[in-house]
Image (cartoon, grey):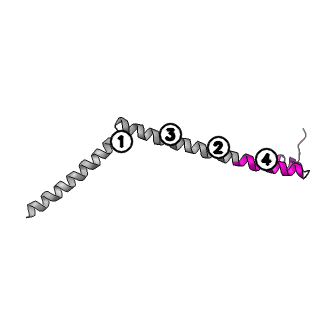
Amino acid sequence: MRRLLWLGIGLAVGALVVRAVAKKAQVFTPQGIAASARDSAMGVAAGVRNFVDDVRDGMAEREAEIHAAFTDGLTLDEDLYPEGRQHG
C-alpha cells in the first residue's frame, strides 16, 4: 500500500514537471517568440498612443489659456519671463 502511495505521488509530480517544462519550452518555439514580439509591439504602440494623447490634451489646454488671455487683453510675457522682460 505504501509503495502505491509513493508511486502515485511520483506520477503526479512527474506530470506536473513535464507540463511545466513543456510550457516553458513553448516560449522558445517560433510561435512563442512571435507571440512575445507581438505583445511587446502592442505594448509599445499603446505607450506611444497614450503619450500622443497626453500631448494633445496639453496642447488643447495651453491653447485655451492663450485664447482666454488674448480675449481678456492680457499678455503672456509673465509666463515666458516671470521676473520681467530682459532687454539685452
Nearer the observer, 53 or 3: 53
Under mark 2, the amino acid is Val
Identify the residue under disc 1: 27
Mark seen at residue 52: 2
Q: CA distance from mark 1 to mark 2?
A: 32 Å
Residue at image x 36%, y 35%?
30
Where is residue 44 drawn, in percent x and y?
Answer: 54, 42
- The first of marks 1 and 4 along the sequence is 1
Whether residue 81 appears in magenta in the rendering, the answer is yes
Task: Please indicate whether residue 64 sits to the left or right of residue 14 in the image.
Answer: right
User: Which residue corresponds to mark 4?
Assistant: 63
Q: CA distance from mark 2 to mark 3?
A: 16 Å
Is 3 rendered above or below residue 58? below
Given contact means CB atoms under 8 Å apart, are the residues at marks 1 and 4 in contact? no
Q: Position of residue 36 (x, y in %)?
A: 42, 41
Which is nearer the N-term, disc 2 or disc 4? 2
- Mark 3 is on which residue type? Ala
What segment carries the magenta color? 57-86
Mark 1 packing: few (<14 Cα in 10 Å), some, or many (20+)?
some
Badge number at residue 59:
none
Q: Is residue 42 visible?
A: yes
The local secondary structure at tag 1 comes to: helix
Reading the image, the residue beneath label 3 is: 41
| Circle 4/circle 3 CB separation < 8 Å | no
Residue 38: in magenta span: no
